[in-house]
Image: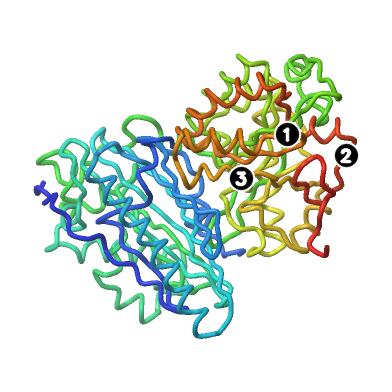
Amino acid sequence: MKNVNLALSRILAVALVGAMLLTVSLFFAACVKTGAEEGEGGSAKSAAGKTLSEIIDDSGFEYGEPAVITDNSAPLYAYIRYPETGIKNVDAAISEWAESLCAEGAAELDTAAGAAGDKAEGEVNIQSRDFFVDERYIGIESDGVFANNMTANPQSIVNTFNVDVQKGELLKNEDIIDPSKVDKAVSLLRAEIAGRYPDMKKDTELKNLGADSLAHIALAHDGLDVLIARHTLLPGYIGSQVFTLPYDKLGDALLVGAEGKDGELPQRSGQDAGAGIAQGSQGMDGAAGTGGAVGAGDAAGAGGAAGEEATRRDIDPNQPMLALTFDDGPSKYTADILDLLEENDARATFCVLGNLVDTRPEAMRRATELGCEVFGHSWDHKQLTKLTPEEVKAELTDTSDAIEKASGQNIRFYRPPYGATDEMVESVSRELGYSMINWSADTLDWKTRDADAVYKAVMRDAGEGQIILMHDIHGTTAQAMKRAIPALVEKGYQLVTVSELLKYSGIEPEPGKTYYNASSPSKDASE
């Protein structure tokens, strides 16, 4: 195999222009800010029954730790998730690409708003999956959208990158497929497309398929994955797709693998493909599902026996109480926060993403056993107000199912991503029987990434009936809780779940309503 020059130049520039299709090549890079340092529409289906978005949205990682870029402020909301490899130059390249997506998206919003003389808002949402192959290579696939309120259709984002772990190098396409034999790979791709979509056999574009169709490739367990973005080669209604070119059929066109054994990249080394991957939800071009909440003990509804036993504790309605809430998990830091809660006889509410529940089911079980509460926070952090009613239903119900399976408790609440609701979202929530829980105090922990700043924000905003927003994907937030939780208890606050807070404040939540704290009335979009 060739040596790859690690002196990578700038990551491929991302052009987010007007309503053009955005397909970002990621054989130079992948997605998101080096986050682990502190913590972490109804499309037509493929032959396998899933769009590329649904497949990638399975979200389990085989190598490294998840890292996330989030921006919870207008005009550009962002949620970009990828596996951080621990290889410095690789992670730097990924971070640069992800940050460029946010920067380019913000610039396009400015341009669109200026041209229309109106306020533009948008969202970047990227999900990723990876494969650890032959105990040496990492193939990463990313899929997502850039959407804004100035254009009718979201722009598709498809990215791939490949890593040689032994050499600590990003691989280029020509390091994977022999440039002199690229026609062999193109022919295989043409056959795969025609096999899945027979009606396209006579399509001129398919007949003229060239090397550029292999722009987005990733090493996977069963073969070389080729990602094709929505509106590229295939009709837009099909959505983004992934086609797998088997290693044995690639033969000597494949450069990576066992040295001197062309096309013999070992299959399914390490864990099985899909191990640790959450199932049963759509993503990106299709609807993605989550939502819901898990109640803690009698305050939140039915729960398992272990949860009921754990929640038998004294709460004095005459003493001040507040609710700490943690979004976007579960993550590797959730366990640390649960330790602190247990040590201080405190409870909290975790607003989790449905596509992450199966990655850390033990955290969900332990939260329940400790009497904590688990809400849904959508399946994959899409802004619900930008989806169709059917997609919102899938976001909520898929997450509810995942949480109930992991915790055994009933669902009553959820927290909408970015706190965004409108009449449509409220109508769907009412139909499904869910109330929405937002917050009265935002620590901005996602922005500061500073433990001291988070601690000060919590102590500044602490007050009777407050619902405080944080994110347990950040190590700095977990660090802040080492000081904040015991300090709040020492000040006399009872740290309770949202359900307990509302119950002891005499509030009976209504489906379709949004609640911000225990002292202000609920709100809906018409108010």
Q: Nearer the viewer, mark 1 or mark 3?
A: 3
In the structure shown, which secondary structural element does the residue marked by tag 3 occupy?
strand
What residue is shown with label 1? Answer: 294
Mark 3, Cα crowd under 10 Å, few <14 / some 14-19 / many 20+, is some
Residue 273 image-quadrant placement: top left
**First in residue order: circle 2 vs circle 3:** 3
What residue is shown with label 2? Answer: 507
**First in residue order: circle 1 vs circle 3:** 1
Where does the image place residue 385, in percent across and percent down from the top left? 67, 62
Instruction: Check disc 1 and give the amino acid type.
Output: Val
Image: 292 above or below 452: below
What residue is shown with label 3? Answer: 442
Where does the image place residue 221, in percent across and percent down from the top left? 34, 42
Determine whether, in the image, residue 490 is placed left or right of residue 519: left
Image: 59 above or below 318: below
Instruction: Check disc 3 and give the amino acid type.
Output: Asp
Q: CA distance from mark 1 to mark 3?
A: 22 Å
User: Can residue 49 be seen at all in this image of the molecule?
Assistant: no
Q: CA distance from mark 2 to mark 3?
A: 22 Å
